[in-house]
Image (cartoon, rainbow, N blue to C red):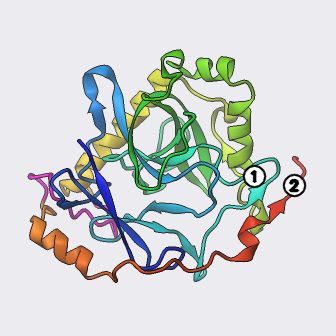
Amino acid sequence: MAYSIEQRAKANSTDYRLFFKDCKGHYISPFHDIPLYADEAKGIFNMIVEVPRWTNAKMEITTKDPLNPIKQDVKKGKLRYVANVFPHKGYIWNYGALPQTWENPSHIDENTGFGGDNDPIDVCDIGSKVCERGEVIKVKVLGTLALIDEGETDWKVMVINVEDPEAALYNDIEDVRRQKPNYLESTVDWFRRYKVPDGKPENQFAFDAEFKNKDFAVKVIKCTHAHWKALVTKNTDGGEINCTNTTVHDSPFFCKPTEAQAIVQATPPCGPAAPIPEDVDKWYYYQKN
């Protein structure tokens, strides 16, 4: 299924939102209405690209807003941008999320000993294409890294776009290690240090920062999909998470296309982009511990 996006308000502002539409032009929630699987029999998943490779704006599906548009994260009233920590420039993969997954904070992960981070599961696409924000791509799962972010389990699933020219060469995490030497180590380095310029300590990892393989990753994804299903059918308490959707008919949060349209139209129309702060393009040298 083809999806399209609609920008609302000014880019680089706290009002900016990126809404999603299905092939009929109806507004949908990327969190709840885009299927997890693009082809379940072949193990192909849908990935929503939130942050294109080499960019800095920390964009994410907003779980607390109706229809869950993509917006830029805000801390202390300021838009968030990840720092360029030498030798990296912005995000070093196409970064995003798997739809219809939820890392439940009330579920203590048996592998990490911590609850989930209350978001859809995160994904890093290692393919050669630099994707667009809001693009929905079909991916193969290769493995996963267990980040422990401020006392929360934050899985990072490594994938490759099935349309990548080299996709056939990648079927498990060791293929990444063999075909792209040092890329996995650079991924750990990125996640370990990206918050340090903001005055925070290095992030920690489960399994001594070792990547787990494809089968392990798929098991984690299926677990988070089950948690999402319980969330959207109100069989578990999601707190402030907004579960408004247009396709999950057994969900008490199901809404009609006219209601979804009213949600979008309540936001400001798209306007000229605001300037990006000058310090976003600075770089930081940080000596590894």
Q: Is the stretch drawn in magenta largely helix, strand or loop? A: loop
Tell me which residue sits at (42%, 80%) in the image. Answer: 271
Q: Is residue 10 magenta?
A: no
**CB-based contact (under 8 Å), mark 2 and mark 1:** yes
Q: Which of marks 2 and 1 is nearer the N terminus?
A: 1
Q: Does the magenta stretch include residue 245?
A: yes
Name the residue nearer the viewer: 134 or 73.
134
Q: What element carries label 1?
A: helix
Q: Give the range drawn in magenta.
A: 237-251
Tell me which residue sits at (62%, 23%) in the image. Answer: 176
Number of other residues with Cα within 10 Å of mark 1, as a class: few under 14, some 14 to 19, many 20 or more: many
Q: In this view, does 5 lie above or below 8?
A: above
Q: Name the residue under label 1.
A: 193
Q: Mark 2 points at which residue?
A: 286
Check disc 2 and give the amino acid type: Tyr
Q: In this view, does 233 lie above or below 158?
A: below
Check disc 1 and give the amino acid type: Arg
Name the residue nearer the viewer: 267 or 206.
267
